[in-house]
Image (spheres, rainbow, N blue to C red):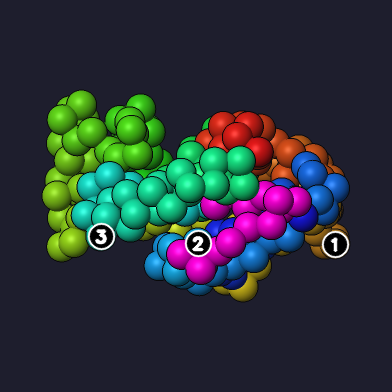
Amino acid sequence: MKYLWTEDRGAGLHFWQMVNQYFFAGEFVVESKGSNQGILDAVRALQPDEADIYYLAFDCVFDNMDVVNKFIELKGLVAKYPERIVLLDIICFEYIIFSFDKLVQWTGSGHKDAIDMRRHILPAVKDHMIDIDTITDEKTRKYLMGFRSYSTERVIKSLAYMLTDGDEWSIKGEKMGRCWHEDCCVLEQVNRRQCHMDLLSGIEKMRETVEKSECHKIISGI
């Protein structure tokens, strides 16, 4: 069997389940371990069968020492079973959405400050962290410095949530908002009008989300 373990619950787990369905024909058993600690605990106890392969979507940013310490231990455990356990190259689920090149176009977000800061932050993400020194925009730097407990993951989550704050595009609930994965609809009103997107099927939208975001690089390791 092939397993994909994620720390994500809710919308993040739903996303990986859809990736499994649409890109791998349900080949994986997708399981949430609830947290990075949950993944680490599960790997500590793991004695993989020769027929099994485990892919780990362990959220990793290098400016959070708690995460770094867990990541170092996890890499040591993974090294014991190099053909049975694969550590995926992932920052976090929210970064997949944040990095999607049609995010602003699709969601129609009105958060102009968040849109502008995203434009400055995306090219500054290197080696699993935001390189603040490369950001010259003062508004963006002030926003980053305003976090009481700063980490790249906190920043990415905060901005990603701002840019997907409508129910249809939400990435915070039990499932991703319906506009990410359901066929586009036409509102049934007297003046029939379409939303700002081209009409796409749910499968087409998921394919675009994966192929034009950080997720494309991540699943290339599977």
Mark 1, residues whose alpha carbon is within 10 Å: few (<14), some, or many (≥20)? few
Is 144 covered by the magenta stretch? no
Quadrant housing residue 11: bottom right
Q: Are marks 1 and 2 in contact (CB under 8 Å)?
A: no
Quadrant housing residue 137: top left
From the image, state whether disc 3 or disc 2 is nearer to you.
2
In the image, which disc is placed on residue 66?
3
What range is drawn magenta here? 44-56
> What residue is rendered at 18% in x and 61% in y?
149
Name the quadrant of the C terminus: top right
Q: Main secondary structure of the magenta part?
A: loop
Q: CA distance from mark 1 to mark 3?
A: 50 Å
Q: How far from the left and from the top, in percent, is residue 209? A: 65, 40
Mark 2, residues whose alpha carbon is within 10 Å: few (<14), some, or many (≥20)? some
Residue 36 seen by the camera: yes
Q: Which numbered disc, 3 or 2, marks the residue that appears first in the sequence?
A: 2
